[in-house]
Amino acid sequence: MQTFLNLDSSDEEIILSSENDSVIQSLKKRIKYLIIYGPRKSGKTSIANNFSNVFKTNLINKLPNDLHIKKETYLDLNNLPAKDENFFHFLQHFISNNIPLTIFTSDSSIENLSDKIYLPDIESRLRQFNLCNIQNPNKDLLLKLIKKYLFLKSITVPEQIIIEVMNHIERTYLAAFEAAKTINHLLYENNHNINLSLIRKYYEQL
């Protein structure tokens, strides 16, 4: 069952679901060294923004030029710099000074950890982190995500339209985002008239 999670932030609400529950619980536990990873558009940045506000942590989206950070930090970086010695020094700064660090990154960054892509010193530091991932959405969450993206565009369509679109897309967060764009496009192109036949024809032509 999904609900909306409001962490008293000015950022967009995120959807609390079984797919990201372990991530939410890990953040609440304040695990000292944590890597949160997941697919594109899975809400990693929104979660980072919300929890950094709640816990008053640093939130950065690139490696800093200096290493004078003394408080808990969130690094939101989709592609970790596997060969950058500055990244090693960044990780080492937090570990040697016992400062909590949470990294938000992509699936591929963690998959590469097993492929010996990283410098050995970076890999050894990253392996000291707990791993926690956001899973791909189930059918119910996919529906809620498309509705959310449409709502953000001030668009309302019958639920059966969204369900028909879902029959033609992958079950991913990015697909939900693109589905809302497709519905918006079809409404625009067809004078705000949309039906199941139009949806089917559109996807058959792709």
Image (cartoon, rainbow, N blue to C red):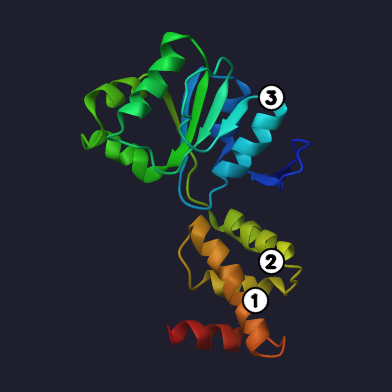
* Mark 2 vs 1, N-terminal side: 2
Q: Is residue 86 above or below residue 147?
A: above
Question: Which x, y percent locates residue 181?
Answer: 59, 71
Question: Which x, y percent locates residue 108?
Answer: 35, 45
Neighbour class for label 1 at 10 Å: few (<14), some, many (≥20)?
Answer: some
Query: Which numbered mark, 1 or 3, is in the foreground of this view?
Result: 3
Residue at (63, 88) in percent of width and height: 189
Q: Is residue 17 left or right of residue 9?
A: left
Q: Is residue 54 above or below residue 108?
A: above
Residue at (58, 58) in percent of width and height: 142
Question: Which x, y percent locates residue 104?
Answer: 49, 36
What amino acid is found at the position of numbered circle 1 in the picture? Asn
Residue matched to label 3: 56
| CB atoms of marks 3 and 2 within 8 Å | no
Q: CA distance from mark 2 to mark 1?
A: 8 Å
Which secondary structure, mark 1?
Answer: helix
Which secondary structure, mark 2?
Answer: helix
Q: Is residue 200 left or right of residue 112?
A: right
User: Looking at the rendered structure, which numbered label has been put on residue 184?
Assistant: 1
| CB atoms of marks 2 and 1 within 8 Å | yes
Q: CA distance from mark 3 to mark 2?
A: 31 Å
Name the quadrant containing residue 20.
Answer: top right
What amino acid is found at the position of numbered circle 3 in the picture? Lys
Task: Between residue 200 and residue 121, name the one nearer to us.
Answer: 121
Query: Which numbered mark, 3 or 2, is in the foreground of this view?
Result: 3
Q: How many marks?
A: 3
Residue at (62, 76) in percent of width and height: 183
* Mark 3 vs 2, N-terminal side: 3
User: Looking at the rendered structure, which numbered label has been put on residue 150?
Assistant: 2
